[in-house]
Structures are given as C-alpha cells and as structure tokens.
Amino acid sequence: MIGSLKGTVEAVDSQAALIEVGGVGYEVRMPSADLSRLHGGAEARVHTYLNVSQDAIMLYGFLEPAAKRTFLQLLKVSGIGPKVALSLLSTLNPNQLAKAVADNDAAALTKAPGLGKKGAQKIILELKGSINLEEIEGTAAAVTTAQPEDKGALQVVEGLISLGWRQQDAEQAVHAACAANGIATPLAAEDVPRVLKLALNSLDRGI
C-alpha cells in the first residue's frame, strides 16, 4: 500500500498530477483544489490511497490528511466509489462536506457531478455522526491560513460561471490554462484577461 508520496511535481493537468519519487513518476488523481496548489518543479507531499479494481489500479492523493480521511469514509458508503468520492471532494472541501452531512443537506452534496439525490441521502444516512466536524474545521482553518486567496483566479472563475459554465468545470479550466501556459499563481491582475480567454477556449473545445 502506498500511503504517501514526497517528491517533485513533474506535470499537472485538470485531473491528476505526475509526481516523481526516486526516478519513478506516479500519476495521482486529486481534487481540483489540491491540483490548483501544485506547480511543476515544486516539491510536494501527497497523502495517497491506492485503489485496485478489475479494470485499473489508480492512485488518489490529497494534500491534507483530513481530505484523505473524508475520502476513505466516503468509500465505506455502499454504492460510492473513488470517482464519486473524488468528485465530491472537488466540489466541497472536507469542512463543507462534513457540514452538509451534519445538516442533512442533500442538495449541497448533489452539486457533485455523478451523485444523485438517492446517493446523497445514503451518504448522509451512513456517515452522519462518523465525521468529526470540529477536527476537520480545525484542519481546514489551518490550511486557509497558510494558503493566500487567489483573487485573480476567483475573478476568472466567476466570469466563466456568469457565462453559464459550472463552477467545477470553470476551476479545472483555469487551473489547466495556468499549468499549460506556465502562468504563475496567484494570478497577477494583468494575467486575468489572458487566463479567462484561454480557459474559455478550452471549455468551448471540450478539453
């Protein structure tokens, strides 16, 4: 079992990061918010989960232990697989997800692509009481303190949403545009129009 990786980020796209450890490149699927914090050439530690199925062997990763714990709890819910669990954590951070479960807010959970109302209700039923909201809130607060808000990226995402694109698709397109074109984040004000154009072009082409 691969529990964590510490190495150099070789590449990042909208779905996964390639992390080189000891000359071996590991493709790690991660939530969109975590991918947006990774940059080529930087060192990173990722908390991982190796999923083995009949069709594939996939490595999932998270920058924070709380996200990995939440992911593993989601996998315990009958009918919820890694793809849906990752979609949830790309839509809601661990704190938001725990609060949605505690508040019986199925509508918040169904914002995640691939999860319907019945699946959301099942998650609430099976996980309510098992997610430590205070622990996750403490971790999320620490992460928020450590990570500056990228106002430029938020501006681009809001612009794309106003044009009718979903938030998750908009965030992934912005991250992919920055990664593919070597644009540093947090975004400088002068880069906002360029990133908006690049992200919109990729969304229009279905990339």
Image (spheres, rainbow, N blue to C red):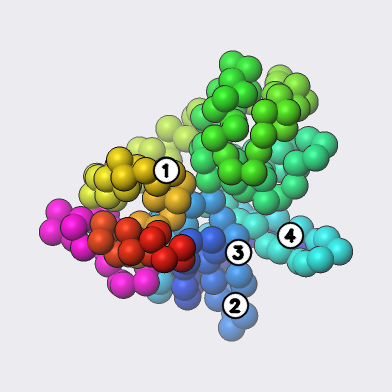
Task: Provide the residue span drawn in magenta.
Answer: 178-194
Residue 181 part of the magenta-drawn span: yes
State the CA–CA distance, disc 2 to disc 3.
Answer: 9 Å
- Inspect the image, locate mark 2, and give the three-letter code of the amino acid beneath it: Gly
Q: Would you say 106 lies left or right of 188 here? A: right
The residue that label 1 is drawn on is 167
For the point 31% across and 45% down, which residue is it?
A: 163
Q: Earlier in the sequence, mark 4 or mark 3?
A: 3
Q: Verify CB contact (< 8 Å) between mark 2 and mark 4.
A: no
- Inspect the image, locate mark 3, and give the three-letter code of the amino acid beneath it: Val
The residue that label 2 is drawn on is 25
In what quadrant of the picture does the N terminus appear?
Answer: bottom right
For the point 59% across and 77% down, which residue is it?
A: 25
- Inspect the image, locate mark 1, and give the three-letter code of the amino acid beneath it: Gln
- Inspect the image, locate mark 4, and give the three-letter code of the amino acid beneath it: Leu
For the point 46% across and 63% down, which residue is it?
A: 206
Q: Earlier in the sequence, mark 1 or mark 3?
A: 3
Q: For numbered disc 1, what is the local secondary structure?
A: helix
Is 194 in front, or is 56? 194
For the point 59% across and 83% down, which residue is it?
A: 23
In the picture, the disc for residue 28 is 3
Is residue 149 shown to the viewer in this render? no
Q: For numbered disc 3, what is the local secondary structure?
A: strand
Q: Verify CB contact (< 8 Å) between mark 2 and mark 1.
A: no
Is residue 84 shown to the viewer in this render? yes
